[in-house]
Amino acid sequence: MKTILLNGCSFAECWKPSDKFISSFGCDNLINLGKAGTSFQRTCRSTIEWVAQNGSPDFVLIPITFSHRWELALNKGEDDIDGSWVPLQNSNFLSDGYNVQESSIDDVKKLCDQYYKIIPTLKTFWDKMFTDIITLSAFLEKQKINYLMWDMCNGFDKRHIEGYKAFEKIKFINQNKSIINIWSFCGNRYMRDTMQDDVKSKTPELAHHHAPEQHRHLEDYIMEHLKHIAQ
Amino acid sequence: MNTLLINGCSFGHIWEPTVNFVDQAKCDDVKNISRPGTSFQRTLRTTIEWVAQNGNPSMVVIPITFAHRWELPICDDKKVGPIDGIWMPLQTNTAMENAHNPWKFRLGSQEDKIKKINDLYYGLISNTVGYWDKMFTEIISLCAFLEQRKIPYLMWDMCNDFDEDLLADHPFVQKAQLIKQNKNVINIFSFCGNKYMWRLKERDIGEPFNQHWGSEEYKGLESYILQYIHNNQIL
């Protein structure tokens, strides 16, 4: 069995790749580890844990989630991949149903409110995400696992980090052929652009769960991209 | 110039490697970018940023700091510098208030807000293994980055004194095996740098070992590390 491992947030979870797409990688099996509301921190942790438990998949696909999300180990769910980790984002998106043991979900919401209030700009989350993208890429390369990552919903723009120090590391991302140019490509935006104009105008540019029809367009783009970088 | 890059927290910061150690590491220059009070998240981020700005060093050595520390991007970058950007290291409020914490004076008007966040953060987390899982992910990631760039390196736990038995009920931390298999990380479940230095002079077993040792103890640590490098053909 040849396996594609797909990992990310709900934008991965809601994607049901076509048989044609899966077979284009020479694979016949898909494991979708995507989980709604989760962070790239979780993508890194759970990809590494999956490889530690199962060995190397034949290909890894990672649609990169929102940079501002994070996680804390609060749960007592203890499933084999996610263990105690609870995904965190703006408090209005947090579920009252989270199992946080003796802690209070209200305290979790308070922490998230304070966390997002004190950080001056969304762009500063990018530094952590860029670091994580570089190291997850390195991990996959060390394990000799082919992979492709692309931004799914951030819409990165270089202008937003002009003047900030300590962003030299982005050159490692820019030079990496296994990461679709994060400054010019965004998966959700690309899928939106494949919609008819009247539907497109009513659809959010970055944060939207697209229908299978749009995912087929994304799959075509990815297959073309892989052919291009293989040349 | 062959550069030895050292990165970690205060346990890296106070270490001034002897000429012999630097020589045995096949280097003739030392860059110590360790900062007191900082996390492994910072070690990971700044090692990568340093390499991006300066190219590959000849060797990287990393004494691994406390697993519970973290950081937030809330500093004025003019005060911090080109490697750390806007990141503020965070640890428990008691430790943040320590007069020796160099970051205490940079908290400024945000001090109360940071303390509230820290209280909530540390108050919510009830299991040490959560911190470990994050740190293990980061150790594996940083190792992969250094290996990908063909940079010789060595890491070891300096102050956590990890107990493998605590992982028994946590099946989601199988990744620890990837660390145990890596000869460039001294076995984190059997070696702890501060504990090793504490035992050098057969101190009372009841004494706390997490303190800043002097140059004599660090020389003892250097000897252990050089022997490990030799035995395991790290260079």
Image (cartoon, coloured by chain):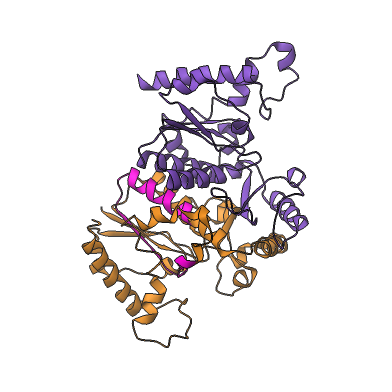
* A211 and B21: which is toward the camera: A211
The quarter of the picture where the C terminus of chain B appears is bottom left
Residue B41 makes an appearance in the image? no
Q: Is residue A175 above or below residue B235?
A: above
Stretch of the chain drawn in magenta: B136-165
Q: Position of residue B212 (x, y in %)?
A: 44, 76
Q: Give the residue at the far bottom of this rendering.
A: B204
Residue B222 lies, with reference to residue A156, above or below; the image says: below
* Residue B112 seen in the current view: yes
On screen, residue B74 above or below A163: below
Chain shown in orange: B
Q: Residue furthest front?
A: A1
* Left or right of residue B132: residue A36: right
Q: Is residue B199 magenta?
A: no
Residue A31 placement, left or right of A200? left
Q: Position of residue B147 (x, y in %)?
A: 33, 47
- Chain A: its colour in the image is purple
Q: Position of residue B5 (x, y in %)?
A: 35, 57
Q: Nearer the viewer, residue B225 or B8?
A: B225
Q: How many marks on residues?
A: 0
Residue B30 found in image quarter: bottom left
